[in-house]
Image: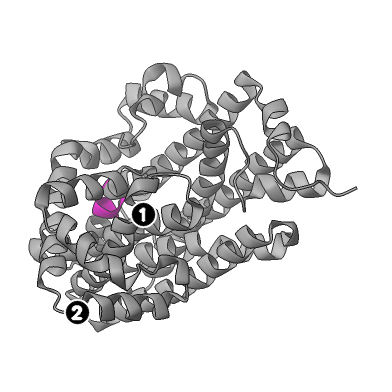
Amino acid sequence: MSSKDEFLFKKSALMSTKSGKEILKQTILREKGYKQFYKYNTNIEEKFQDFTKRFLLSLHTQIISDPNPSATMKKFVEETSSSELALDDQKISDVKARLSKPELLADRVQRILNSNYVKMTFPVLDALFDAASLYYKQNIPMDIKNAIIDGHLIAIDLSEPMDRIIDKDEDLEYLDDYRLMNPYILEIAREKISQGGDNLLRSFEEGFKDARIGQFIDSKLKVKPESINDENMIGCYKKYRAIMGTTGRNMALNMKPLNEVFNLGMARAGESVGCGNEIQDAIKNGAIKIPSWPLYYTFTTNDVRKAFDLTMKKSEIYLDEARMALYMIPQDFDYKPFLEFLFLTVGHYNQYWYNNLNRRDLYPLLQKNLSLPLRT
């Protein structure tokens, strides 16, 4: 299975979680869900390299051919309403010259593509697109299929450089490079998605608008974390469910009924993975992420251990809602076992990091490094 942390799906890791054991069972018995999932994970590295090459070529072309990168930057910052994403005009020429070198741009692209959200989603989009095409009896040319999938994967990947700029917790020496890359990444995503028609592009624009709302709430909470509450955490998670849900909707060519089914499944699965990612980040950084569900629950319960217990429960609620999509699928839909297997991998991902946190007993460290005073 595809992940930047390959050990996550080794036998020893799978044996450590309930979902992982079910994955192993399906693997041994060669059940349909496993076989469908395995099909799309075959030669995954080669397929991902091909996608990376297409992305890199498009990005390099965009950067070197732009006669007015300053105007491009200004337009992007206005659209995203985030001044932190702006690159100083005085730096633009130097950064553009640096990224005009293919080998340096390739390094930056590899860095932002090294993301579980991107790598775990890549084969899923391929499968969902084929599932919808089969159901609707649509014979989509391969170049159009690649463009639609590439465009949405690139849009998902855009969150990586944006988050690193805002969070300032990774790749600090490359943040200016990411600032210059962002507008072109968005333009490439739009251009590729538009090849699927106006219906898909409109759907993407609506999702991207909602994702920006979530990102705006996220950035506000970073500045004033003590204002965290359940409502604004739900709003913050809009960045996950909007972009992932829209991606699912458009893999179904934005056609009923599968567009709603894929939207629900992908949106809620994305939110569930978001919880697992917050647990993983706490382990990696030795601190609770701001904002995050663990921070909210710590702030409200005054108990770090209980906060992560509740975050795990929250991930399970999201995943249960994702599984509701299975009950909405038409009877003659052939890929239901694939979705069931997919949700098992999400459950395993979350359970693995939660178990890892408990095994290492990092709660005293997380309590010590807590930057937000607890309520009394």
- Residue 146 against residue 4 in the figure, above or below: below
368 relative to 193, above or below: above
* CA–CA distance in space, label 1 to label 2: 20 Å
Q: How many marks overall?
A: 2
Relative image position of residue 293 (x, y in whole percent): 65, 49
From the viewer's side, name the closer residue of 375 and 178: 178
Q: Earlier in the sequence, mark 1 or mark 2?
A: 2
Q: Is residue 136 visible?
A: no
Question: Disc 1 residue type?
Answer: Leu
Which residue is tagged 2? 68
- Residue drawn at x 71%, y 59% as measured from the top left: 228
With 336 as the anchor, is 109 left or right in this view? left
Q: Which residues are magenta?
A: 123-128
Name the residue carrying label 1. 175
**Is residue 124 covered in magenta?**
yes
Do the residues bearing badges 1 and 2 touch, measured as CB atoms within 8 Å? no
Judge from the rendering whether residue 281 lies leftward or rightward of residue 365; answer left or right: left
Magenta portion: prevailing SS class: helix
Q: Amino acid at mark 2?
A: Asn
Queried whether the magenta region covers residue 357, the answer comes back as: no
Question: Does residue 334 appear to the left or right of 270 in the view shown?
Answer: left
- Toward the viewer: 164 or 273? 164
